[in-house]
Image (spheres, rainbow, N blue to C red):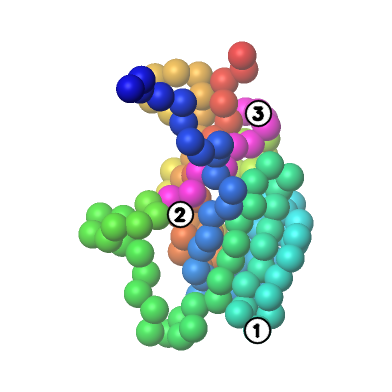
Amino acid sequence: MSQHNDPITRGAHHVGLTVPDLPATRSFFEETLGFEAVGEVPAYPAVFLSDGHGMITLWQAEDPASATAFDRHKNVGLHHLALTVGDQDALDSLHTRLTETPGVVIEFAPEPLGHGPTRHMMTAIPGGIRVEFIAPAKA
């Protein structure tokens, strides 16, 4: 019997996030990041958003007031979502935009990722979910 080492999967189809305020989080992805709604289920309620490269599903928490926020030091689950931006200038421009976006907390401004030329920044978007933005080094 031979070992087969090729991956079975082909990348993420989508990431699903439960949020305390679906309209505010949807607005952030559409208006701040330029995502487009590709579907929704109002009765669920859920919205499906895409940047043309991947999809994010947002679900409304049933009772946001009693929901438990994720603690990256204590909980098992999504530590953060990392999204790629086009280049270093796009990362810097996004950083400026996010400093002016209500409900966004900048954990750290653009800085080198490790010791290489790739740069990244970490934020908490409206609703508190941590999102990292990464500008890969030019090839």
**Horizontal relation, residue 33 to residue 102: left or right:** right
- Mark 2, secondary structure of its residue: strand
Q: Residue 27 location in percent, x, y?
A: 69, 66
Q: Which residue is mark 1?
A: 43
Q: Is residue 88 magenta?
A: yes
Badge 2 or badge 3: first in the primary sequence? 3
User: Mark 3 or mark 1, which is nearer to you?
Assistant: 1
Instruction: Name above or below for residue 122 compared with residue 102.
Output: above
The foreground one among 139 and 104 is 139
Identify the residue at horizontal 37%, vertical 69% (top origin). 69
Residue at (68% x, 42% y) in the render: 53
Left or right, 65 with reference to 9: left
Q: Tell me the SS state at disc 1.
A: loop
Quick check: is 32 in the magenta stretch?
A: no
N-term mark: 3 or 1? 1
Q: How many marks?
A: 3
Look at the image and give the residue range highlighted in magenta.
Answer: 80-89
Residue 78 screen position, x and y as percent: 40, 55
User: Is residue 17 something one can see in this rendering?
Assistant: yes
Mark 3 belongs to which amino acid?
Answer: Asp
- Image position of 124 with respect to 82: above or below: below
Along the line of sight, the residue nearer the viewer: 78 or 71: 78
